[in-house]
Amino acid sequence: MYCLLCFYFLAGSGFVIHDENDDYTIILNDRLGPEVNRKTLGHELEHIKRRDIYANEAANYIEMERHRL
Ligand SMILES: [Zn+2]
């Protein structure tokens, strides 16, 4: 697993990528500061743990559920 702190110019605090080598890369927005990055990292790790990338539910539904935790 990789975690990159980088300039993220799209809306949002971060996201996760799963590649063909079964590696995960979490991209965090360095403009948002360490506190937000730490929370986003936890959020993205939860997506990985729950295998949300491959869930059948709509992305908006999954995000709503994860932000309720
Ligand atoms: Zn999310």
Image (cartoon, rainbow, N blue to C red):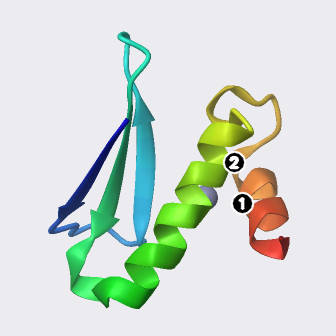
Which residue: 44% across, 45% down?
16
Which residue: 33% across, 85% down?
34
Q: Nearer the viewer, residue 8 or 40?
A: 40
* Vertical arrangement, residue 50 with respect to residue 26, above or below: above
Residue 52 appears in which quarter of the rendering?
top right
Q: Nearer the viewer, residue 58 or 36?
A: 36
Residue 14 appears in which quarter of the rendering?
bottom left
- Say if disc 1 is inside 8 Å of ligand 1: yes
Report helix, strand or loop for mark 1. Answer: helix
Packing grade of label 1 (10 A; few <14, some 14-19, many >=20) is few
Could you tell me residue 38's position as x and y percent?
Answer: 45, 75
User: The N terminus appears in which quarter of the rendering?
Assistant: top left
Report helix, strand or loop for mark 2. Answer: helix
Which residue: 81% across, 28% down?
56
Q: Which residue is mark 2?
A: 59
Q: Residue furthest top?
A: 20
Which residue: 53% across, 76% down?
39
Q: Is residue 45 left or right of 31 when viewed as pictured?
A: right
State if disc 2 and disc 1 touch (CB < 8 Å). Answer: yes
Q: Which residue is mark 1?
A: 63
Spatial distance from mark 1 to mark 2, Cα to Cα? 6 Å
User: The C terminus appears in which quarter of the rendering?
Assistant: bottom right
